[in-house]
Image (cartoon, rainbow, N blue to C red):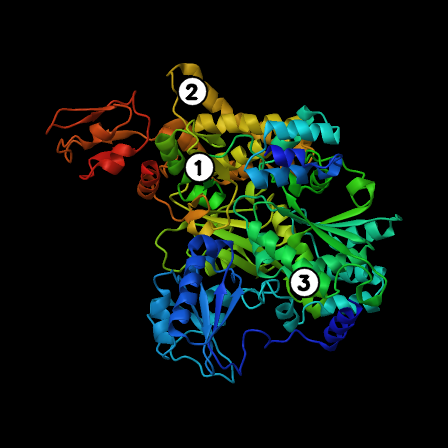
Amino acid sequence: MEEYINSLKKNIDKRDLLLALQDFQNKFGYVDQAFIEQLSLKTGIPSGKIYSIASFYNQFRFIRPGKYHIKLCSGAACHVNAKENLVAELYKLIGIKDRESSPDGKYSLEFIPCMGACALGPVMSINNNYYTQLKIKDLKKIIHDLDEI
Amino acid sequence: MKATRDITYKKLLQKDQYSESGGMYKAGIKVPHIYAERSTCSIIAGIDLTIHYLKQYFEESGDEYVYAETACKGFCSNDPVISIQLPGRAMISFRNVFYNKISSILDSILNNILPDKSMIIGQYSHPELTSWPDVPEITQLNFYKNQTRKLFKYAGFIQPLSIESYMEYNGYSAFAKTITSKTHSEVCGIVEQSGLRGRGGGGFYTGEKWRKALEKNSDKKYFICNADESDPGSFSGRMLLESNPHLLIEGVLIGAYAINASDAIIYVRSTYTLAISRLENALQQALSAGITGEDIFGSGINIRISVFAGPGAYVCGEETALISSIEGSRGMPKTKPPYPSESGLFGFPTVVNNIETICNIPVIFSEGVEKFKATGREDSFGTKLYSVSGRADYSGIVELEMGRTVKNLLGIVRQEDNPYPVKAVHIGGPSGGFIKPDDFGLRLDFSAVFNNNLWFGSGSFIVLDETNCIVDITKYYIDFINKESCGKCIPCREGSQRLLEILTRITEKPRTGQKFESLLRFKGVTQLEEISAIMKETSLCGLGQNAPNTVLSGLKFFRQEYEEHIYEKKCAAFVCRNLKEYSVNVDNCVGCGICAKRCPADAIIGSARNTHFVIQERCIKCGTCFNACKFDAIIVT
């Protein structure tokens, strides 16, 4: 990561701020504080302002994602198909809420606005493996299997 | 470069009509052609694994075959879909082809035997090809028969990764003709005549918007396509991008030409990774074919198109917010005027159009204004895309002529013999509202929808039945608005917070049992209407102004349900968790103790082989006991 930060261009235009943030997140999965501070030096925008811009958007995360990154669709169709019960169950199983990582770094959870498989809701993905028409029973089994690894 | 450009240009001008028999109905094929409908929805359903096994199947048998990737036709509940065309036979499509089914389907179909009926969607007959016996015609299926498909006409036929495939259906010829034979003003005039209205929700006349930007003198102008689409429950924009990215590019090109802009930006939500990769691939192909870029077709016109991956904020669907987002700051709306057509991106005149609006442009230019105006009615012409989900039998994208009724749409997506009646329909996402069954005769066109205080939004259409709670759905949308409100103006920021608090209070039981809590619950409802009215009148942008629509329409049509929540503290649909009460049916309980063992809150007591009891004060309404009991002894009230 340090290498990447050091290899940044000397001057970054204010317009490219979001692009730079996106690029960093695509590489490392989250936006690191060290990066924001460097970005602040190179763009001339105060780091607080960069935080205010980055935190405005849903895409940016500021916590390192866990080994298993769980995305749960919170679109309207999934909600209608009883997503809430899954959220409660998931909290019971791994003890984290939206945009949090578990202390041991194993799990992180994120609610996605809509994944687009509205016909197959509720939908969940763990590291890009998709689970459709998810029931509480299936969820328990999936998390249980991961726990044992 | 110049040579390719001239060849493309000549090729494009030779074509007059959209050819009906391009691409998929190839009469003279020698080996089996296999098409996989690969889109985000089918990837989630598991089509990648099916494709893997399909390729393996042919590798093992050593037979020759042709494989091509198409995109979803909009019938998402059938995913994953595989279509097969054997030499001399009509094309046949299969539904729900999971990885374990592909080899049995191939085994039988390659030997000219039809597999199990339940897996067949239907076939596309063609006069030169032998049809399959007793297989329904896909175009005659209830789902497709009643739709008017224009934007989605070739979805599932066109290969989104190939520009040639789009050109076989006469793609880009409308643009080629427009750019060489019409002036900027004429193009604006055609769109004005067509009466096309913005599909993003506001329903502003597109031609008018373009004319304003064209008339503004400036050395630089921008044309922006808004494909942000962050409404929950709407996915038509993503489907357009994934099934036919070139259609959008053609629309953007005509639009940019019309306002004389040299730069166009397509703003796509960053979570749509497949859509973005297909769009970027399509842009690359268009650039190397000489359709975009510098000096297009030797006319001296430059149109550069770039993609901006929007980092995700619902409010960025508002045009001024979208512009600030591209400028690299917080996506907050600005006061209008000045309108973007006067001073937009970096201060230059800018036109922002919704993706669905832009996809209509090539259709208008290729079929002509007359034919376009033949669909729709009065002040709304053309078609509208609906993303159908919820308690529908067939979910997916439905394209309907403007002015058809809600009943028509329900007829397409619901089976007649569905035992659960529709309680309500919610259209328009967070800014939309409920429609009750008595009003299902409502025409879905701009004037009728606006007169009923509704909102098209980006066309989400959610079917609700008795298992859905109106208050809960309203709470869900207000929660969404509350999270997505940019925080600039007070009515929206604070109003949505208050609305959410009131709705949460209604869906919970009074916790302390003190009298003022019940009072607050009553007061809440009168305040709901008051706050909504203030938000509607004083919010800065469309997000805040339309946010209370769901609350107001819910209160208007389903007041009884609200009252039930408040007075009787009951949720008839058993959705609102905190209003549920779990108790033990004494007759059924055998005293096995499994509920007490599983209960995370130690709220169930009882000794072995004796009836158990739930201590209401401790119960956290998780439902574990209900799922655990094998004797139906736990009852929910």
Q: In which quarter of the view is residue B369 placed?
A: bottom right
* B328 relative to B77, above or below: above
Mark in front: 2 vs 3: 3
Q: Disc 1 sits on a residue from what chain?
A: A
Which residue appears farthest toward the left when viewing the image?
B609
Which residue position is annotated with label 2?
B518
Residue B391 seen in render: no
Name the one closer to the observer, B344 or B387: B344
Q: Amino acid at mark 1?
A: Lys
Among numbered discs 2 and 3, the one appearing first in the sequence: 3
The x and y percentages for residue B563 are 43, 31
Q: In which quarter of the view is residue B629 placed?
A: top left
Q: Quadrant of the N terminus of chain B?
A: bottom right
Report whether mark 2 lies on the same chain as mark 1: no
SS under mark 3: helix
Q: Disc 3 sits on a residue from what chain?
A: B
Q: Amino acid at mark 3?
A: Gln
SS under mark 1: loop
Q: Disc 2 sits on a residue from what chain?
A: B
State the separation of the CA atoms marked 2 and 3: 65 Å
Name the one closer to the observer, B256 or A38: A38
Name the one closer to the observer, B252 or A17: A17
* B214 relative to B1, above or below: above
Q: Quadrant of the C terminus of chain B?
A: top left
Residue B412 seen in render: yes
Residue B585 horizontal side relative to residue B174, left or right: left
Mark in front: 2 vs 1: 1
- Identify the mark at residue B66; answer none if there is no mark: none
Report whether mark 3 lies on the same chain as mark 1: no
User: Going 88% across and 49% down the picture, which residue do you hit?
Assistant: B219
- Identify the mark at residue B285; answer none if there is no mark: 3
Which residue position is annotated with label 1?
A67
